[in-house]
């Protein structure tokens, strides 16, 4: 049917016939492939890292985080070669519940330590995190100033997986960062449970961020986490909250007295501060440096790092055994059946476990 606008009676603009459209907008576009990233050798990685090349460091960390066996093999070689250049840093674990102000605080803590020179890497352990699914953006916006600082390297938590696996990757990333000349390492974790133990096992100082609450703040926090802390800091001590924060600090001090003396010989300190307004930041870092001097003098610093090295040896063994077991096709096939037997009461958990293990070990 004719278009009404083309009728003689129609006085408006006539419809043009138009021209034939080309098949694609730009046929040459398809020919243009983005250059493929060059594969790096172990030597490329190690040399780049030792030069402090952040792009290569990032790629090495990606390798560490990869689940592909060939990447893992390459990563292990790179780590081994970097190991002699690692260790020269102060590693600080920072923990607190969501909303405690970790991001805000790490931003100001980071700027504070960088004012004195050196380089800072901020890593994270968050096995449950959705945020960690490869999105660096999340962390970049969380730490606004630090993320654009030329001497900082921010890396989100390795993506969700078993805590042991996530933690091991972060531990290995520390080695790479240190070899790249980062002399301050922050490892952040969400204060909700076991990930603290993992962080504690890779840092020299464990800082717990707390908030002044309704007076019963001590109830919500697990005794084990408090026992791990080398310093407890009460955030948001600003405005009308100052007195409450001070009161909370004295509650924490009292509570700490009830704990057995820590192995380090150091009595954990409790301070108040405001990350948002930048108040009391210097005092926190003075405390951390005081601690480092103290434990370097009494030998505990070395001792703790040695203990951690031992811990990671066993952790790595455990992780590999677990992976090897669960990834074994014969076991995977049996697991479901045994699980059903246990659920239906036909087998006890222990017998089922023993049968699976016997099968795995070829008995
Ligand atoms: P995170 O979840 O532990 O990383 O906590 P954030 O750093 O995201 O902070 C949570 C909220 O607390 C944000 O709205 C911050 O602006 C606020 N906040 C952080 N530090 C302070 C502080 O020192 N004082 C006050 N009043 N608010 C703060």
Image (cartoon, rainbow, N blue to C red):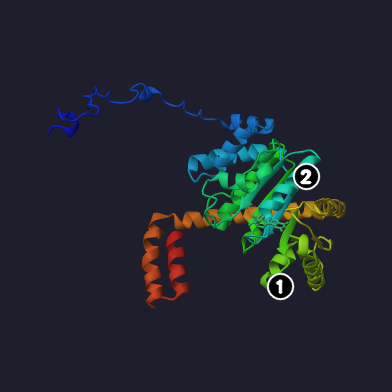
Say which residue appears at 62% left-offset and 40% top-offset: 79
Q: Position of residue 89 (x, y in %)?
A: 75, 44
Reply above or below: 198 against 63: below
**Can see residue 133?**
yes
- Judged from the image, the quadrant occupied by ligand 1 is bottom right
Q: Position of residue 36 (x, y in %)?
A: 47, 28
Q: Mark on residue 214? A: 1
Is residue 232 in sight in this rendering? no
Residue at 69% over, 38% down: 149
Position of residue 23 in the picture relative to residue 48 (left or right): left
Asked whether 336 or 210 is in front, the reply is 210
Mark number, residue 113? 2
Pick whichever of labels 2 and 1 is earlier in the sequence.
2
Work out which quarter of the rendered image holds the N terminus and state it.
top left
Q: Are there few (<14), some (14-19), or many (20+) residues within 10 Å of tag 2?
A: some
Number of numbered discs: 2
- Residue 216, image quadrant: bottom right
Task: Work out whether residue 240 or residue 66 is closer to the camera in this orientation and state it.
Answer: 240
Helix, strand, or loop for circle 2?
helix
Instruction: Measure the alpha-carbon separation of dots 2 and 1.
Output: 32 Å
Residue 101 x, y percent position in the rendering: 68, 57
């Amino acid at each position: 049917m004719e278009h009404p606008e083309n009728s003689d009676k129609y006085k408006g603009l006539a419809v043009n016939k138009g021209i034939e459209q080309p098949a694609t907008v730009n046929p040459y576009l398809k020919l243009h492939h983005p250059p493929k990233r060059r594969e790096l050798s172990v030597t490329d990685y190690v040399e780049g890292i030792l030069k402090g090349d952040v792009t290569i460091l990032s790629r090495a960390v990606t390798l560490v985080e990869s689940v592909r066996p060939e990447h893992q093999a390459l990563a292990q070689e790179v780590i081994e070669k970097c190991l002699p250049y690692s260790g020269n840093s102060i590693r600080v674990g920072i923990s607190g519940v969501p909303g405690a102000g970790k991001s805000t605080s790490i931003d100001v803590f980071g700027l504070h330590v960088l004012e004195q020179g050196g380089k800072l890497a901020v890593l994270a352990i968050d096995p449950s995190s959705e945020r960690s699914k490869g999105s660096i953006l999340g962390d970049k916006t969380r730490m606004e100033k630090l993320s654009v600082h030329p001497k900082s390297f921010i890396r989100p938590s390795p993506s969700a997986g078993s805590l042991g696996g996530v933690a091991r990757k972060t531990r290995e990333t520390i080695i790479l960062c240190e070899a790249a000349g980062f002399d301050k390492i922050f490892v952040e974790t969400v204060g909700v449970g076991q990930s603290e133990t993992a962080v504690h096992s890779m840092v020299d100082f464990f800082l717990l961020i707390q908030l002044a609450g309704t007076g019963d703040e001590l109830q919500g926090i697990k005794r084990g986490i408090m026992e791990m802390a080398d310093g407890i800091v009460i955030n948001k001590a600003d405005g009308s909250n100052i007195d409450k924060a001070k009161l909370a600090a004295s509650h924490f001090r009292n509570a700490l007295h009830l704990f057995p003396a820590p192995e380090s010989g150091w009595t954990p300190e409790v301070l108040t501060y405001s990350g948002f307004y930048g108040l009391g930041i210097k005092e926190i870092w003075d405390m951390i440096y005081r601690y480092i001097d103290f434990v370097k003098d009494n030998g505990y610093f070395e001792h703790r790092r040695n203990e951690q090295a031992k811990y990671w040896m066993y952790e790595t063994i455990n992780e590999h055994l677990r992976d090897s077991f669960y990834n074994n096709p014969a076991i995977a096939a049996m697991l479901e059946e045994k699980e059903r037997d246990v659920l239906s009461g036909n087998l006890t958990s222990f017998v089922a476990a023993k049968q699976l293990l016997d099968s795995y070990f070829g008995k």
